[in-house]
Image: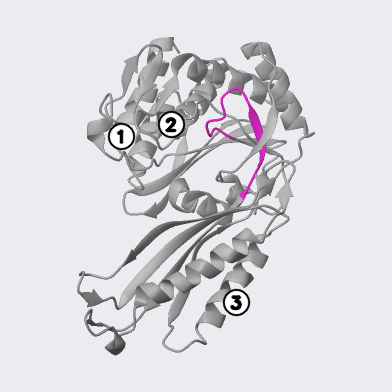
Amino acid sequence: MDQQKKIQILKDMVNIDSTNGHEEQVANYLQKLLAEYGIESEKVKYDEDRASLVSEIGSSDEQVLAFSGHMDVVDAGDVSKWKFPPFEATEHEGKIYGRGATDMKSGLAAMVIAMIELQEEKQKLNGKIRLLATVGEEVGELGAEQLTQKGYADDLDGLIIGEPSGHRIVYAHKGSINYTVKSTGKNAHSSMPEYGVNAIDNLMLFYNEIEKYVASIHTTNEILGDFIHNVTVISGGNQVNSIPEKAELQGNIRSIPEVDNETLKRRIVDIVNELNKKEHVQLELIFDYDKQPVFSDRNSRLVHVARDVAKGIIKEEIPLLGISGTTDAAEFTKAKHKFPVIIFGPGNETPHQINENVSIDNYLEMVDVYKKIAVEYLS
């Protein structure tokens, strides 16, 4: 496949607005593209206008190496602040700009093109490459969860997730918990607060307690770093001269093995239960999202092959590291047996930012990296 077509494929994918859903349009595009080269694929329906895509090349079941990437993107934000329209992929000074250019349509496109080129070259593989293109990674790893439950990861011998890592290989990442606390009070005129119950005041009781608990945690992990907690959304009340009857907040936790998800959840439940013993306090706790930390073997054969291949193509030493962000690996690693995982894909520090972009050179070199990793690993 010539270079310009590879660039156009990424542009076509960025031009599809798959913001927090609507991934089936991306799946349709990739299914049609793969079919042009004689590669069959299967859509796995998740919801209306939402479907993951599964495809395979190779002829032997001896080994299965998975390539995975998500098709959804986050909201573009204030479009007026973008240098170029976020869903009109623009090539400028060696980069492609657009929402999803880095996170992570470039990684997914590079994986698909790698499979197409291996098929075109009739490359002998001692096993199969399986594409797992997912929905809903940004809002709960929904597609990865569904595909894992349906058994698509049960026979894997290795997994590469094409999330943006640049010239680095990630083998571990933190877990993630999202939670909501809702406070119910009683309306009253603001001049007569004694006749009401201020839902915001009671919500702040929780906020202060959770912040105290977080401040008491001094544990760290030598690979992943510190435990992290942030309250990120808060709302309450409906007009300035009324005591608010409703208020709620949302928090996000990035967990490490030393402060594990179950311990954290039990402590939050305890805080809410203790506060609800107070007069007029009515709090409801909901856990929206619970993803475990991922630790793969830094000495796995997949890591060694990927580092050696990348060093040969990129001409740099490729460091190994852990990161704070979570990925679809948190769901795929719930499969029936363990397998090595790496996160390795084109990109930079612009995910979720205005003017998100990816280096064209980095995108194109990863096509060759993925191809050679697959050949070496399935040898």
The amino acid marked with disc number 2 is Lys
- Label 2 neighbour load within 10 Å: few <14, some 14-19, many 20+: many
The alpha-carbon separation of the residues under discs 3 and 2 comes to 41 Å
Three-letter code for the amino acid on which mark 3 is drawn: Asp
122 or 355, which lies in front? 355
What span is in magenta? 161-174
Mark nearer the N terminus (1 vs 2)? 1
Q: In which quarter of the image is the C terminus?
A: top right
Q: Give the alpha-carbon distance from disc 3 to disc 1, as whole Å.
A: 45 Å
Could you tell me the amino acid type at mark 1?
Answer: Ile
Image coordinates of residue 348 in percent, x first then y, are 50, 26
Verify CB contact (< 8 Å) between mark 3 and mark 2.
Answer: no
Please indicate whether residue 83 sits to the left or right of residue 52 in the image.
left
**165 versus 368 height, above or below:** below
Q: Does the magenta stretch include residue 170?
A: yes
Closest to the camera, between mark 3 and mark 2, is 3
* Residue indicated by mark 1: 16
Q: Give the labeled residue for mark 3.
A: 270
Label number found at residue 105:
2
Q: Which colour scheme is used?
A: one colour
N-term mark: 3 or 2: 2
Query: How many angstroms separate mark 1 from mark 2 (CA)?
Result: 10 Å
**Image check: 162 left or right of 316?**
left
Instruction: Give the image location of residue 261, x and y in percent.
Output: 64, 61
Q: Is residue 275 magenta?
A: no
Q: Which of marks 3 and 1 is nearer the N terminus?
A: 1
Quadrant, the N terminus: top left
Residue 151 visible in the current orientation: no
Q: Residue furthest right?
A: 299
